[in-house]
């Protein structure tokens, strides 16, 4: 089976730019191994005016039988000997879709480092598929009409010709195979993503077992076009091999994404009826958000980013990064050239990777961010050499006897030039009307400090490890109990930072003043 991708060009934009987008040189024939055979990439024509790339997939039928998890042709047998006699080596199916993703992975992600911006430009494309199984299976009509129904809404001009069973005997009628030619002007990455989804949909079968992670693959490849497709239900159902539980899950997630987009929110913020994951640090469970135009979690992130900008940091550690909210905020500012997120929870890191869409980032953007698993109470050579580190709503999750180990790992061993620490102000808890007296804000908090206690701890850490520090409130200020969050900015050596009168300030001797409680460094009981 094979697929050809062609484009035209001019002297200003030569057609051979296709080679840069596909990351395959037009002057070479390249060979790639797949789980079921060998894929070859070649260019029958590569000129300034016209360039055609061909992916030829040579299927090993023995490997296909040995590795198949289902029966017959990819789990949908046509007859008793289908696993031995079938169309899989010749017809464009899920085998070709997987080969596209394997061979053209960077192109599918829209990555082209050698020609920045090229992947974002639409191309005049012509895609040819000599034999596509279009089996309606009683639910979509099948044939050329089905091909048109799937591709036309995406902006393609569709030329689909049904292939006769036998040209010598026209009275036998058409086969289920269609010769397809698609022409349109769109980004190459979009075209490849659409083919990756729609080829298995047309075939109505897959050569591998459809597991729950297929939902993630579908939503990732369908981003930007699937949710608005008039045949959404058909595509989702057939892509997921008619597994109704997975189909329902995919449709629910797509509906949630549309709601979130309409409200300019993240899907997780909309889907808040059931909390099946750890709470985002700093999102106070008892905060009456309706009274505040800006949530405290957002104010906290803004305060952290402002403090980092103040230090001039470019390479930043987010220690205890959770689901990546702060990492995402830092990536929006180009002055932060590298962000390393660290968390002990692999589940949190997986959620952060999904939320940040790491698999969809350009190579240039993905080079700025990395997520790693690690425990903050142990020294880690990977954390050395950074300009700044952030501990946002982290320290209160440690038992007090383990806090010195974190202090040494961060301030002593990693020793960034600046450290930003935030933690709840327990005095403010009396302002949460629904929080019972004496309770902490999160069930996992081992302690919550007063302003005096936090100032005492900050002064002790600064003196022990050679930092200066300044304190400042975050969130709405209350004359009696201060602000809901307290922030400390530590900096190595140099003169003591002086904050505005609205902030809590401290010098190297630890004396604090302003509306917040005045304490002498080291005098607070922890």
Image (cartoon, helix red, strand yellow):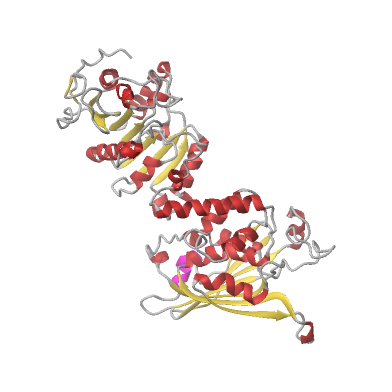
Compared across the picture, whether 442 is left or right of 243 comes to left
Q: Position of residue 185 (x, y in %)?
A: 45, 74
* Vertical comparison of 372 with 1: above or below: above
Does residue 314 belong to the magenta stretch? no
Point 22% across, 22% down: residue = 480
Residue 184 appears in view: yes
Where does the magenta region start and end? 16-24
Q: Is residue 102 above or below residue 478?
A: below
Percent position of residue 387, x then y: 30, 37
Q: Main secondary structure of the magenta part?
A: helix
Q: Quadrant of the N terminus?
A: bottom right
Q: Position of residue 428 (x, y in %)?
A: 30, 24
Number of numbered discs overlaid on the protein picture: 0
Query: Residue at point 58% right, 62% down?
Result: 197
Which residue is the extreme one toward the left? 501
Please state if 447 lies on the left or on the right of 304 as rendered: right
Is residue 480 depicted above or below 205 in this figure? above
373 or 122, which lies in front?
122
Residue 500, by quadrant, is: top left
Residue at the outermost right position: 80
Q: Quadrant of residue 73?
A: bottom right
Is residue 69 rendered to the left or right of residue 378? Answer: right
Residue 360 seen from this side? no
Residue 21 drawn in magenta: yes
* Image spot of residue 76 (x, y percent): 75, 60
Residue drawn 43% across the image and 61% down it: 112
Q: Quadrant of the C terminus?
A: top left
Q: Nearer the viewer, residue 77 or 337?
A: 77
29 vs 327, left or right, is right
């Amino acid at each position: 089976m094979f697929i050809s991708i062609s484009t035209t060009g001019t002297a200003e934009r030569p057609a051979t730019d296709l080679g840069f987008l596909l990351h395959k040189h037009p002057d070479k024939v390249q060979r790639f191994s797949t789980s079921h055979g060998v894929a070859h990439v070649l260019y029958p024509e590569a000129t300034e005016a016209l360039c055609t790339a061909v992916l030829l997939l040579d299927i090993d039928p023995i490997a296909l039988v040995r590795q198949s998890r289902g029966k017959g042709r990819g789990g949908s047998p046509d007859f008793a000997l289908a696993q031995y006699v079938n169309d899989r080596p010749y017809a464009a199916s899920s085998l070709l879709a997987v080969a596209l993703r394997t061979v053209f992975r960077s192109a599918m992600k829209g990555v082209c480092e050698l020609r920045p911006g090229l992947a974002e430009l639409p191309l005049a494309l012509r895609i040819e598929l000599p034999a596509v199984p279009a089996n309606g299976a009683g639910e979509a009509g099948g044939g050329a009409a089905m091909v048109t129904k799937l591709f036309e809404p995406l902006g393609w001009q569709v030329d689909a010709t049904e292939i006769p069973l036998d040209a010598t005997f026209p009275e036998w009628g058409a086969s289920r195979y269609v010769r397809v030619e698609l022409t349109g002007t769109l980004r190459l990455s979009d075209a490849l993503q659409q083919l990756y989804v729609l080829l298995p949909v047309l075939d109505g079968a897959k050569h591998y077992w459809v597991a729950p992670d297929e939902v993630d693959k579908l939503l990732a490849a369908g981003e930007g076009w699937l949710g608005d497709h008039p045949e959404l239900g058909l595509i989702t159902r057939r892509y997921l091999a008619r597994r109704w539980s997975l189909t329902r899950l995919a449709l629910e997630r797509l509906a949630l994404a549309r709601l979130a987009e309409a409200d300019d929110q993240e899907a997780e913020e909309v889907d808040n009826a059931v909390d099946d994951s750890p709470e985002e640090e700093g999102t106070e469970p008892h905060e009456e958000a309706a009274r505040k135009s800006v949530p405290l979690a957002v104010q906290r992130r803004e305060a952290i980013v402002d403090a980092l900008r103040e230090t001039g940091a470019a390479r930043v550690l987010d220690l205890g990064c959770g689901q990546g909210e702060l990492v995402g905020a830092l990536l929006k500012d180009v002055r932060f050239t590298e962000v390393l997120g660290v968390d002990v929870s692999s589940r949190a890191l997986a959620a952060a990777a999904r939320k940040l869409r790491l698999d969809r980032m350009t190579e240039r953007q993905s080079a700025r961010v990395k997520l790693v698993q690690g425990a903050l109470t142990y020294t880690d050579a990977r954390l050395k050499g950074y300009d700044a580190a952030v501990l946002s709503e982290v320290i209160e999750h440690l038992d007090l006897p383990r806090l010195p180990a974190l202090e040494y790992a961060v301030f002593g061993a990693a020793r960034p030039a600046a450290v930003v620490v935030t933690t709840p102000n327990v005095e403010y808890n009396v302002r949460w009307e629904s929080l019972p007296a004496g309770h902490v804000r999160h069930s996992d908090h081992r302690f919550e400090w007063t302003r005096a206690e936090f100032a005492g701890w900050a002064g002790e850490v600064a003196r022990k490890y050679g930092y200066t520090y300044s304190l400042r409130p975050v969130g709405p200020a209350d004359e009696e109990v201060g602000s809901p969050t307290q922030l400390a900015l530590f900096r190595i050596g140099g003169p003591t930072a002086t904050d505005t009168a609205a902030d809590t300030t401290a010098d190297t001797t630890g004396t604090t003043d302003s509306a917040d409680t005045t304490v002498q460094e080291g005098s607070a009981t922890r």
